[in-house]
Image (tube, grey):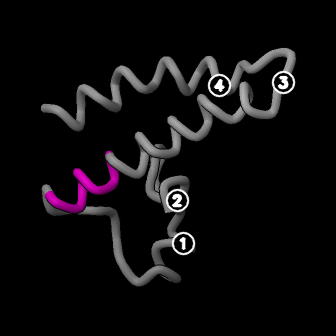
Amino acid sequence: METQFGSPGPSPAFRGGYGADLPTTESERRRRDVYTLYLHLVMSIEGTYRQYPEDPIGDWARAQLIDDLARITA
């Protein structure tokens, strides 16, 4: 769920199959922000857990957490 509703947003095919458009209410947007935070947390932990020698995706995800937290706590 978090990957489909995150940036850049769901494709028209996904939205048609899911039966809903982009989140429009404040509650729906907040829920999507939490899904995005969850995804970035998983991505930031996975490389260390799997002992990757380099983890550019994890590095990117950790940088995104600052923005995620700012959106959720605003």
Q: Amino acid at mark 2?
A: Gln
Image depth: mark 3 or mark 1 in front: 3
> Would you place residue 2 above or below residue 53 in this image?
below
Instruction: Please name whichever residue, 17 or 29, is drawn nearer the observer in this view of the structure.
Output: 29
Q: Amino acid at mark 1?
A: Phe
Left or right? Give the position of 23 relative to 73.
right
Instruction: Please name whichever residue, 18 or 33, is drawn nearer the observer in this view of the structure.
Output: 33
Question: Dot 1 surroundings within 10 Å: few (below 14), some, or many (20 or more)?
Answer: some
Q: Amino acid at mark 3?
A: Tyr
- In the picture, the disc for residue 47 is none
Q: Which residue is mark 1?
A: 14
Instruction: Please name whichever residue, 33 or 50, is drawn nearer the observer in this view of the structure.
Output: 50
- Main SS class of the magenta portion in the image: helix
| Residue 50 percent coordinates (x, y) | 80, 33
Question: Dot 4 surroundings within 10 Å: few (below 14), some, or many (20 or more)?
Answer: many
Mark-to-mark CA distance, 3 and 4: 10 Å
Reading the chain from its start, which is encountered first: label 3 or label 1?
A: 1
Q: Which residue is mark 4?
A: 58
Reading the chain from its start, which is encountered first: label 3 or label 4?
A: 3
Question: Dot 3 surroundings within 10 Å: few (below 14), some, or many (20 or more)?
Answer: few
Q: Which residue is mark 2?
A: 4
